[in-house]
Every structure is written in C-alpha cells, then in structure tokens.
Amino acid sequence: MASESVALPFTIEPTTAPTPADHRADLIANPAFGRVFSDHMAMVRYSEGRGWHDARITARKPFPIDPAAAVLHYGQEVFEGMKAYRLESGGIATFRPEENARRFQASAARMAMAALPQDIFMTAVDELVRIDRDWVPTGEGKSLYLRPFMIATEVFLGVKPASEYLFMVIACPVAGYFGSGCVSVWVSDAYTRAAPGGTGAAKCGGNYAASLIAQRDSQTHGCDQVLFLDSREQRYVEEMGGMNVMFLRDDNTLVTPPLTGTILPGITRDAILRLARDQGLTVEEAPVAIDEVFEGAATGRYREAFACGTAAVISPIGSFRRTQGEAVFGDGKTPGPVTLALKKTLTDIQAGRTNDPHGWVHMIG
Ligand code: PLP
Ligand code: COI
C-alpha cells in the first residue's frame, strides 16, 4: 500500500572529509540557488522482490549508473522540493514535510514508479538535515533546500515501468530564488506545459525539461519567468515554470487556478489559501482568463499578483507581457500590501517567529 508504515533502519556513514567550518561559513553566507551542496546525501534502493532496502546517509559524491538505466532513456524520474529553516529558537524545522511525502507518492504513481513509504521519505530527510545541520544558514530568507528524488535504475531498454529504483535526498543552502523586488512574466503563446490526462500534476523532471524552451523564450522577451496557459483554448492561466500563481482583486478576493490535474498542487499554494482565509480574504479557486487579468490590471480590478512555491516563497509579480501588450500592477516595481502581508505571515511561521496555528512546523532538532 502506498502509505504503509515501514521502519527501515538507515546506516549513517559520516563523511571522512567534511568541509572545514570557515569554508562552509563562506559558502553559506550568500549562496546562489542550487549551486552549493552540503556534505552528505541519503540513498535508498528498491527492487521488485526485495522492496526498499540499503538505506544510508553517506558522503555526497557522484555515483555510478549504467548507461542503459531506464531513467536515462525514458525519463522515469520524480522529485520534491522542500526547505529546512533555522528557527529563532535555534532549532531546525521543515514545513509540512508529510505533504511532500504524500505528493512524492502521487507523482511516483503517475509515472508508474514504486511507492516510497512516507516513513522512509521522512526519515531520509530528517537524518540528512540532522547530519548536515551546520549547513542550515541563518538569516532572513535563507534555508537549506532539500531535493528528494527518485530515478529508475533498471538496466533495460524496453519501454515499461522499471523494476529497480534509487531514492535520494541532497541538500543545498539557499537564499532567495529571485532577487528582491518584483518579477516580470512572459505569457507564452507558443508553448503549453500540460494537457488534460497528462503529467501536469506530477512533479516529474520531464515537465521541467519541456518548460525550458518557454523559460528561455521569456528571457528573450526581457522577462524573468514564463506563465503557461491551458492547452485546450490558451485562454486560462495555469501556472509558471516552477511555481503557482495567485491574483488579488479589488473585492479582496484572492483567486488562483483550480487543481484540475494540469497544474502542480503546491504546498505553498495550499498554505497561502488557508492563511488568506484566516486573514479575512475571500478565496476562490476558479479559472482565471488571461484577458481578464490584462483588462483588470488596467482598470484596477486586478490589484496584485504573485508567484508562490517552496523556492520562490511568495514573489510579487510586477507585470505580465504578451505579444499584444503588457499588464502592469501598480508601478510594476513595488510589491502590493496584501502580497507582503501574506509573505510575512507565511515566513514568520516557517522561521518560528510566530505561533503555528495549523501545526505545519516539523521540528528536527
Ligand atoms: N508549480 C510548479 C511547476 C513547481 O515546480 C512548484 C515548486 O515546487 C510549485 C508549483 C509550487 O509547489 P510547492 O509550493 O509545493 O513548492
Ligand atoms: C521548488 O520550489 O521546490 C521547485 O521545485 C521549483 C524549482 C523552480 C526550484
């Protein structure tokens, strides 16, 4: 069963060559996203017959892979993104990790991969953070980004679900994904991200591979990010390459596209919707027509927009651009007050600066 409880003992093999403390301090002072890695990694193997086995925390290093491993040919891969935060109290915590464990199972199911029991996912993450606790940076907006992922390792070129998998977790200290200020977003009319019945709701590498050309396109149009529209009519907002999107209307309604299977069910998205309700906003999960956003930005009906996700946290959107023109929120540079208030509430909970009304903070040590 997907959610069965399995206690798998992890062998802990500390690295024999830890990064010296002064070098580590330099590395984590202001790391570029995804460029700096901690000393260890978690690894667990799966094979049909044996099930999950050989769980270990070990020195982070390259590992051998057969050139015929299925992942290299058919892209059977899923991943997660989550963060460990250093709390005001000095402790370390993750945010809603059981939701990542659940989504990981859902993504794996969509890609016909083995189900990783949630206990193994949670233990791998907790043990990695414990051994690399000195890599969790201190300071506003900083955290240890965790990347659990699973690849098909069966050596076989036939097209079928693999019978062997490798689950791993790696970690990197990060600051913001974007610089400060507002993000500009290109609305793609050339590419879509996901179709009904496709893999849009799964966090699989293939979705990101398919989005890269659109992301590059957004940069050639002078934007930071790309927004995808629905693949049927190209009328409705879906999500961005690596984050969900939300809008604030002038009737104090926070609106975001519904989870119909073509967008990723973001854990940050879910948290923000709950916090927005707590703050007295009306929340709507409803289709958002892109024409309405462009008209609404001009009339003031649409006041604010932001991207949200683990890496992006809450990133204010200053403008959307498309072939036919531009939609600018405010002066295009200053984040809206509701966006900022939601960001503060969310990040205060994540950093332990305020109480945790929904029980989202998972203490590690
Ligand atoms: N949508 C996509 C395509 C993403 O890659 C992410 C990031 O993980 C999100 C949305 C936001 O999800 P979460 O808030 O769980 O990080
Ligand atoms: C995350 O937010 O964790 C993601 O996976 C998105 C990616 C842009 C880093």
Image: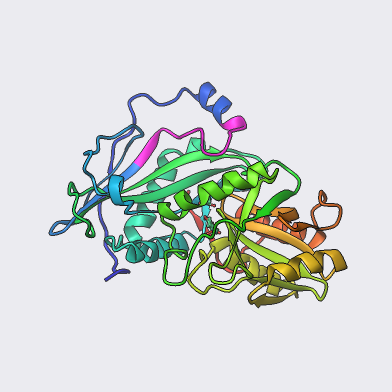
Q: Who is closer to the viewer here, 219 or 120?
A: 219
Q: Which quadrant of the figure has residue 244? A: bottom right
Residue 39 on the magenta span: yes
**Percent of width and height locating residue 296:** 80, 69
**Percent of width and height locating residue 319:** 76, 54
Q: Which quadrant of the figure has residue 222? A: top right
Q: Which residues are magenta?
A: 28-41
In the image, residue 21 sits, relative to residue 143, either above or below, namely: above
Q: Residue at x 53, y 67 (%)?
A: 231
Q: Residue at x 34, y 32 (%)?
A: 61
Quadrant placement of the N terminus? bottom left
Dominant secondary structure of the residues highlighted in magenta in the image: loop
Q: Who is closer to the viewer here, 135 or 157?
A: 157
Q: Which residue appears farthest toward the left when viewing the image? A: 49
Q: Who is closer to the viewer here, 140 or 241?
A: 241
Q: From the viewer's perspective, tell me whether residue 219 is left or right of residue 252.
A: left
Residue 38 on the magenta span: yes
**Percent of width and height locating residue 117:** 31, 62
Q: Residue at x 57, y 25 (%)?
A: 26
Q: How many marks?
A: 0
**Residue 83 visible in the snapshot:** no
In the image, residue 255 sits, relative to residue 315, either above or below, namely: below
Q: From the viewer's perspective, tell me whether residue 11 is left or right of residue 325.
A: left
In the image, residue 256 sits, relative to residue 135, either above or below, namely: below
Q: Which quadrant of the figure has residue 160? A: bottom left
Q: From the viewer's perspective, tell me whether residue 138 is left or right of residue 206.
A: right
**Residue 75 visible in the snapshot:** yes
In the image, residue 230 sits, relative to residue 7, either above or below, namely: below
